[in-house]
Every structure is written in C-alpha cells, then in structure tokens.
Image: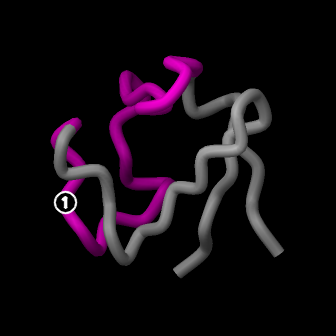
Amino acid sequence: MQKFECDVCGYIYDPAFGDPDNGVAPGTAFADIPDSWECPTCGVGKDDFSPVD
C-alpha cells in the first residue's frame, strides 16, 4: 500500500502500521482514514499529505 508524507513536518503515514494511538488500525489505506484525522506529529489535516514514491 502507498505511504504518504506530511508536507509540513515529514511524518510518514505507513498503512502497514496505521496510527493506532489515534484510532487508525494497521492495514488502513490512507484514503480510508477519516477526513477528521490529523498528523500525529504536527496536527495538520490529510490535505497536507503527499504520496511517497
């Protein structure tokens, strides 16, 4: 699955790990994360993430 990087702080969302501390289970694709989710490091929204090549 595609990883995504926060454009602001560089946090990498890796679907293999999810973000369980913030209610996103491992195996959750970035597109399936709720729109209300925020970067766990800096707090920006999903719109400020870009796909990692």
Instruction: Identify the residue position indicated by label 1 in the image.
Output: 25
Residue found 70% across the figure and 32% down from its top: 9
Dominant SS type (magenta):
loop
Magenta stretch: includes residue 35: yes
Q: Give the image quarter of residue 6.
A: top right
- Would you say 52 lies left or right of 20 here? right
Q: Where is residue 40 in the image (x, y as percent from the top left)?
A: 41, 32
**Nearest to the observer: residue 49 or residue 34:** 49
Q: Position of residue 38 (x, y in %)?
A: 44, 26
Disc 1 crowd rating (10 Å Cα; few below 14, some 14-19, many 20+) is some
Residue found 67% across the figure and 30% down from its top: 47
- Would you say 11 lies left or right of 14 here? right
- Would you say 33 lies left or right of 21 here? right
Residue found 38% across the figure and 54% down from its top: 32
Segment colored magenta: 22-44
Q: Where is residue 31 in the image (x, y as percent from the top left)?
A: 49, 54
**Nearest to the observer: residue 36 or residue 5:** 5
- Would you say 31 lies left or right of 37 here? right
Q: Where is residue 29 in the image (x, y as percent from the top left)?
A: 42, 65
**Residue 14 higher or lower than 9, as above or below:** below
**Residue 27 higher or lower than 37, as above or below:** below
**Nearest to the observer: residue 27 or residue 35:** 27
Residue found 49% across the figure and 30% down from its top: 41
Labels in figure, total: 1
Q: What residue type is labelled 1?
A: Ala
- Residue at the extreme right of the image, as rendered: 53
